[in-house]
Image (tube, coloured by chain):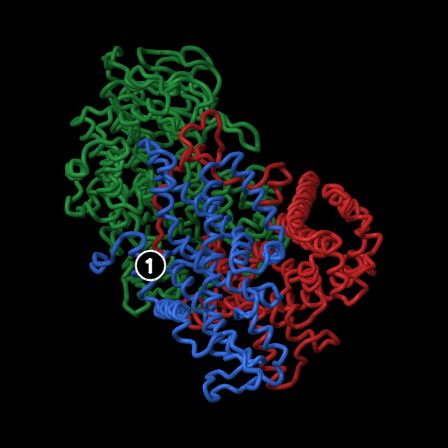
Chain colours: A red, B green, C blue
């Protein structure tokens, strides 16, 4: 397990480095010299355009070659000293991120909770009532809701609750009432997606013989559903919920821009629009870090929840990879057990009569 | 058997309601099962045997409409309210399934799954429940039950898993066990072990209903039999009478189609001349798969030959390497070492164009006919695909050839432009055979071509292959797990186990005088329909790896750790 | 079962026959067709130019004289702008999805087809791209390439191929395990021919589904970029632009965002229902089969 964790951490760091290189490389293509950009950044603030921060010039000035700038930035990243941003020379990149992250989190956490609280019961209900009106109705509603992006939903909510009913503020960030619209708007699409996922996952488990077996042992349907089916179908939910949360914590870009919320999304947008290289690099890497960490956590938790994965890892081999190299006609000397190995089991056709609708 | 039957089913009818409300009848059955009795419910897929048994316990989906009577323990199970019915499930009637991998929840330990229903039924406290579960595991012959009870299903071997599932269904102490194809997914030797566990349970007083498509299993295990077809009961009889004198034509058809090993064959004293022209020769083939868990020797040092007009059977259980061997010979999988020559050409050294030319002369038939046909092409297009690939003929000529081939394998020519999915499994396999014959190959490699099919269809396909073999002068390499099938079709049989050849002999010789203990174990584990099963004792582990292949009589090779086994009487 | 004979049995034909029976999906398809027609005929249908300002007639309410949906803060005709914005949305939606699909097809098919080291490298690259959350990469690219429609198309396309490449690879890998691939190899069919003539036709259903879900996502990205101020340059109208401009005046003139919002929402629903219908018709999705 520890070896597995170490391997994953190495991969995470390599991925981060790759992301930083790609981002930095792309930024080199941005038209305009450093001093222009730095001036543009400060002047948009209304600051003194001529007085470019000497600290900035030293780090990223014209005479400094690109690779050195990159190394400077990466050194800053590791030592947690990324220096000032172009646009806000008074603040360092890490200060800006630390300021904005809690704002985004205060949207993401309630939105995630709301999502889970609604999606799981709805998904379970739809699966249990499969083929009935309640199932069709909820699947249709979920499909419809899933089609609408969060920012459209935010606008709808604004029109109803802010413009028409006047109950909530239109935009801004000044108190708990400013949370309602963005949180609900953020939660809608994930809720719809997750509920459908729960439904599908439940239906898949319901097809397994162990459900009939548990009922044939005399289990109440409800008990069987909770003890076996729900439990098994919620395990893979982790793999969806993790990235979803990472998305919520970072990907509120459009809603934050629309509703004027000073979160990470807006920080990134501002950085992008003003081509604020240090801030852009900082936020992008921060996003990537959250994503990769979340994926790592998901995989670890998944291993803890599913004994099959747990045992595979502790015995040192990973999930079997899908078959490879099937098409190449000359694959001499190489092969994986996945495809060409073992004999088909001599199974005769089983009765699948029950599955017939 | 006198007195009240334990279970008495009268006019049980099951139908499924579809979305429009129309009813599709699925089963109609009347049977009695005496206490301590054993009833076989026999039929091919879709005959309604599983549906009717699940209906007894109310385990069908809500779209099922069930009527009739089923008296068990003084009560009519049909229409019994759910809470009452639950008291019957488990403590009254237990159920076991075809595939333990699916019937056991993969994420819960055996302990949870073997004890939870004892708690549901309030039969005993937790401690007693665990003790009873351990006893049940012990009863089905699982060694070290108190250690294994803490394991997850995937940590057990196939046979062990199957037995753990049986333990799960008997731990609540039922009087009747419904076994739904309990041995269909396992190898013959394990099948025999599982059946003997069940037999032991029956001797201890448990009545058993065995749902099966395999008449050999039914005959070995059951006193009575019900034959079902298309949801209807065809015949019901005692097993003895049924075997000796089945009354219904369908029953007789099933009996005739059942492949049986004939162990009383006279060994052919004049084996076919050994100087046959060798078409395919494989020498010292090795295939190692490099898995994460280490290297697996799927095929280890195997040499086979197939002569002109000869049919060679390769027999083995799952994991014996027989399918890998077929793919090595076809060069679908590259061997790790060894050599294969076809009619003098080195197949492994062959370059792309040379290999392409050689492929014309060797064709293959696969296990799963639907999977091996192109789903997006018509039957005719499927059959001419090899001709197209090898640039044979004009489109019109190819079409004519397709028609000719369809006639040859017995598919109505007017259906040439339909798609494979519109045909039944047996027809699909005929089409697959037609495709394999399109290029007029000299050698046909068949990988379990009948094991995905129902018994009666299997017999037809075997007849077809036998017929084609003689008419077209084909050589054949026939991979199968079924010794009876091999005996029926093959001139020579090669027995494989764990990647090695353990024995190889002319067919008549092998079945009359099996030499290697593994071959004997295989033969003994097989369950014939028309004769009594051979004596059998649980196999101690047989060494299939060590030793050299020794020619004991002409053309009869045996892997021998200890030299020269004595003559069998 | 006799009616089976009348159903066409080719992959596409069969899918289409089943798709047709789904009224919601068919209606959505007609609706999208209508939208495309309107977008193409925009100069004929729009009563005004999208850029024509009339500072004396600002914030006219809907159904005013000559202005069906009123005018905006610069006195431009909202109805005309809406019709032209459809052009922006559909052009960028379709084109960006085309770019994404092309990249995804090449990378997904190549990885699955070639296997081995190539696959490892390609999928490793895909994993790295996956670490750029959401539309971040599109934002970066627009910043670099500018706000022309072409660069927006390329930016969105490049930012959204990752998921589709994974889907395509998974699909190809699945089809590769079907026995018919082995059967074709045993016949002597070449690898390329197997991939193009036999695997691709079996992946048509999933590809169509992917595309029909990809287009609305691209439209969402395009409007999102406009909300960030990175959409097509004004005065060219886009839904996102109209929304963010109108949002400033939402308390007094909510009608300014209601119009684009409604059209946007309906378009999203139509594409989703088409996608859903396709998924059922080709029996490809994660959804249940009876």
Q: Which residue is mark 1?
A: B8
Q: Residue at x 43, y 79 (%)?
A: C47
In this view, the residue in front, B232 or C178, is C178
Up the image or down, A315 lies above or below C5; here it is above
Above or below residue A336? Residue C212 is: below
Residue at 45% over, 39% down? C113
Name which residue lies at 41% across and 11% down.
B564
Placement of A185 over or under C186, stated as above or below: below
Q: Residues within 10 Å of mark 1 (few under 14, many from 20)?
A: some
Is residue C28 at all visible to an observer of this figure? no
Q: Position of residue A189 (x, y in %)?
A: 56, 66
Which quadrant of the figure has residue A186?
bottom right
Picture quarter with the C terminus of chain A: bottom left
Left or right position of B472 against B557: left
Q: Residue furthest bottom?
A: C65
The residue shown at (53%, 66%) is: A192
Horizontal arrangement in the rendering, residue A304 relative to residue B393 (left or right): right
Please count the marks in the image: 1
Nearest the viewer among C238 and B321 is C238
**SS class of the residue under badge 1?**
strand
The N terminus of chain A, quarter of image: top right
Residue ranking furthest to the right: A54
Give x and y (percent) for residue B130: 61, 50
Task: Find residue B494 and report its horizontal and vertical position in percent.
Answer: 35, 22
Which chain does the numbered disc 1 sit on?
A: B
Q: Nearer the viewer, residue C69 or A53?
A: A53
Q: Is residue B542 visible?
A: yes
């Amino acid at each position: 397990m520890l070896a597995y964790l170490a391997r994953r951490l190495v991969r995470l760091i390599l991925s981060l480095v790759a992301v930083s290189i790609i981002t930095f490389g792309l930024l080199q293509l941005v038209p305009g010299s450093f001093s222009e950009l730095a001036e543009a950044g400060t002047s948009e603030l209304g600051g003194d355009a001529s007085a470019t921060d000497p600290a900035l010039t030293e780090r990223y000035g014209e005479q400094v070659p690109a690779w050195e700038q990159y190394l400077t930035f990466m050194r800053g990243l590791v030592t947690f000293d990324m220096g000032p941003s172009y646009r806000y020379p008074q603040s360092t990149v890490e200060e800006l991120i630390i300021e904005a992250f809690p704002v985004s989190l205060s949207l993401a956490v309630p939105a995630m909770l709301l999502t889970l609280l609604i999606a799981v019961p709805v998904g379970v209900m739809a699966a249990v009532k499969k083929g009935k009106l309640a199932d069709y109705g909820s699947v249709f509603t979920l499909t419809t809701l899933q089609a609408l992006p969060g920012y459209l939903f935010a606008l709808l909510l604004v029109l109803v609750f802010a413009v028409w009913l006047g109950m909530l503020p239109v935009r801004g960030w000044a108190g708990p009432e400013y949370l309602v619209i963005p949180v609900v708007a953020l939660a809608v699409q994930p809720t719809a997606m997750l509920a459908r996922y729960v439904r599908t996952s439940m239906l898949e488990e319901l097809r397994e013989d162990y459900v009939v077996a548990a009922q044939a042992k005399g289990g109440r349907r409800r008990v069987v559903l909770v003890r076996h089916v729900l439990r098994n179908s919620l395990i893979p939910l982790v793999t969806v919920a993790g990235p979803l949360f990472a998305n919520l914590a970072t990907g509120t870009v459009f809603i934050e821009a629309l509703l004027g919320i000073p979160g990470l999304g807006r920080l990134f947008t501002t950085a992008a629009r003003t081509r604020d290289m240090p801030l852009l690099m900082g936020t992008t890497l921060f996003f990537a870090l959250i994503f990769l960490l979340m994926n790592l956590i998901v995989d670890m938790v998944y291993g803890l929840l599913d004994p099959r994965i747990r045992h595979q890892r502790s015995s040192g081999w990973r999930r079997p990879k899908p078959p490879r190299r099937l098409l190449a006609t000359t694959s001499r000397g190489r092969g994986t057990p996945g495809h060409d190995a073992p004999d088909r089991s001599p199974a005769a056709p089983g009765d699948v009569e029950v599955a017939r609708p | 058997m006198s007195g009240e039957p334990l279970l008495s089913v009268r006019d049980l009818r099951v139908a499924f309601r579809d979305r429009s409300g129309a009813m599709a009848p699925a089963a109609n059955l009347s049977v009695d099962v005496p206490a301590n009795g054993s009833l076989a419910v026999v039929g091919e897929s879709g005959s309604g045997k599983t549906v009717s048994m699940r209906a007894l316990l109310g385990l069908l989906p809500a779209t099922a409409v069930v009527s009739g009577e089923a008296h068990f323990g003084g009560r009519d199970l049909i229409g019994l309210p759910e809470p009452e019915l639950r008291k019957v499930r488990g403590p009254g009637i237990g159920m076991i399934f075809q595939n333990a991998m699916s019937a056991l929840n993969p994420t819960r330990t055996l302990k949870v799954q073997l004890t939870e229903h004892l708690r549901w039924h309030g039969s005993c406290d937790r401690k007693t429940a665990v003790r009873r579960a351990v006893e049940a595991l012990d009863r089905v012959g699982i060694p070290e039950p108190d250690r294994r009870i803490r394991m997850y299903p995937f940590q057990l071997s196939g046979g062990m898993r199957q037995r753990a599932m049986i333990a799960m269904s008997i731990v609540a102490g039922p009087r009747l066990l419904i076994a739904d194809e309990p041995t269909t997914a396992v190898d013959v030797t394990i099948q025999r072990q599982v059946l003997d566990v069940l037999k032991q349970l029956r001797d201890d007083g448990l009545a058993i209903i065995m749902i099966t498509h395999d008449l050999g299993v039914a005959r070995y295990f059951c006193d009575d039999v019900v034959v079902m077809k298309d949801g209807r009961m065809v015949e019901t009889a005692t097993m003895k009478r049924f075997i000796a004198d089945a009354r219904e034509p369908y029953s007789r058809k099933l009996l005739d189609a059942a492949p049986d090993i004939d162990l009383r064959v006279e060994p052919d004293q004049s084996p076919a001349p050994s100087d046959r022209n060798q078409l395919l020769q494989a020498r010292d083939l090795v295939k190692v798969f490099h898995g994460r868990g280490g290297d697996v020797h799927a095929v280890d040092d195997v040499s086979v030959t197939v002569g002109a007009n000869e049919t060679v059977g390769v027999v083995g259980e799952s994991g014996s390497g027989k399918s890998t061997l077929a793919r090595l010979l076809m060069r679908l999988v590259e061997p790790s070492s060894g050599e294969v020559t076809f009619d003098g050409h080195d197949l492994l050294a062959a370059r792309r164009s040379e290999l392409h030319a050689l492929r014309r002369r060797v064709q293959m038939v696969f296990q799963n006919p639907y999977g091996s046909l192109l789903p997006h092409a018509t039957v005719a297009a499927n059959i001419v695909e090899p001709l197209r690939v090898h640039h044979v003929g004009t489109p019109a000529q190819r079409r004519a050839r397709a028609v000719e081939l369809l006639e040859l394998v017995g598919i109505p020519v007017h259906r040439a432009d339909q798609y494979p999915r519109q045909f039944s499994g047996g027809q699909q396999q005929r089409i697959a055979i037609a495709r394999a014959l399109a290029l007029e190959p000299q050698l046909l490699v068949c990988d379990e071509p009948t094991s995905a099919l129902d018994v009666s269809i299997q017999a037809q396909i075997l007849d077809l292959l036998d017929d084609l073999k003689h008419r077209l002068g084909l050589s054949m390499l026939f991979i199968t797990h079924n010794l009876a099938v091999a005996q029926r079709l093959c001139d020579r049989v090669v027995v494989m186990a764990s990647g090695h050849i353990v024995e190889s002999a002319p067919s008549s010789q092998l079945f009359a005088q099996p030499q290697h203990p593994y071959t004997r174990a295989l033969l003994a584990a097989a369950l014939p329909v028309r004769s009594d099963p051979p004596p059998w004792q649980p196999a101690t582990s047989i060494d299939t790896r060590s030793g050299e292949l020794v020619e004991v009589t002409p053309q009869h090779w045996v892997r021998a750790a200890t030299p020269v086994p004595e003559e069998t009487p | 079962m006799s009616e089976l004979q009348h159903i066409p049995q080719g992959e596409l034909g069969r899918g289409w026959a089943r798709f047709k029976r789904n009224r919601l999906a068919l209606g959505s398809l007609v609706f999208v067709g209508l939208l495309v027609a309107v977008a193409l005929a925009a100069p004929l249908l729009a009563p005004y130019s999208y850029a024509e300002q009339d500072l004396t007639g600002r914030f006219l309410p809907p159904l005013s004289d000559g202005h069906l949906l009123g005018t905006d803060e610069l006195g431009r005709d909202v109805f005309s702008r809406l019709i032209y914005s459809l052009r922006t949305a559909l052009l960028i939606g379709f084109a960006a999805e085309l770019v994404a699909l092309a990249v995804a097809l090449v990378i997904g098919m190549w990885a699955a087809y070639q296997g081995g080291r190539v696959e490892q490298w390609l999928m490793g690259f895909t994993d790295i791209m996956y670490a750029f959350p959401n539309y971040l990469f599109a934002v970066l690219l627009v910043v670099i390439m500018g706000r022309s429609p072409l660069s927006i198309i390329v930016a969105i396309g490049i930012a959204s191929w990752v998921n589709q490449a994974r889907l395509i690879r998974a699909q190809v890998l699945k089809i590769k395990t079907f026995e018919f691939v082995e059967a074709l190899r045993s016949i002597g069919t070449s690898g390329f021919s197997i991939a193009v003539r036999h695997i691709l036709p079996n992946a048509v259903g999933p590809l169509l589904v992917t595309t029909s879900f990809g287009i609305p996502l691209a439209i969402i990205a395009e409007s999102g970029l406009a909300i960030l101020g990175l959409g097509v340059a004004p005065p060219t109208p886009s839904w996102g632009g109209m929304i963010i401009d109108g949002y400033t005046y939402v308390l007094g003139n909510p009608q300014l965002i209601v119009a684009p919002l409604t059209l946007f929402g309906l378009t999203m629903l139509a594409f989703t229902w088409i996608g859903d219908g396709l998924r059922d018709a080709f029996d490809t999705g994660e959804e249940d089969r009876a």
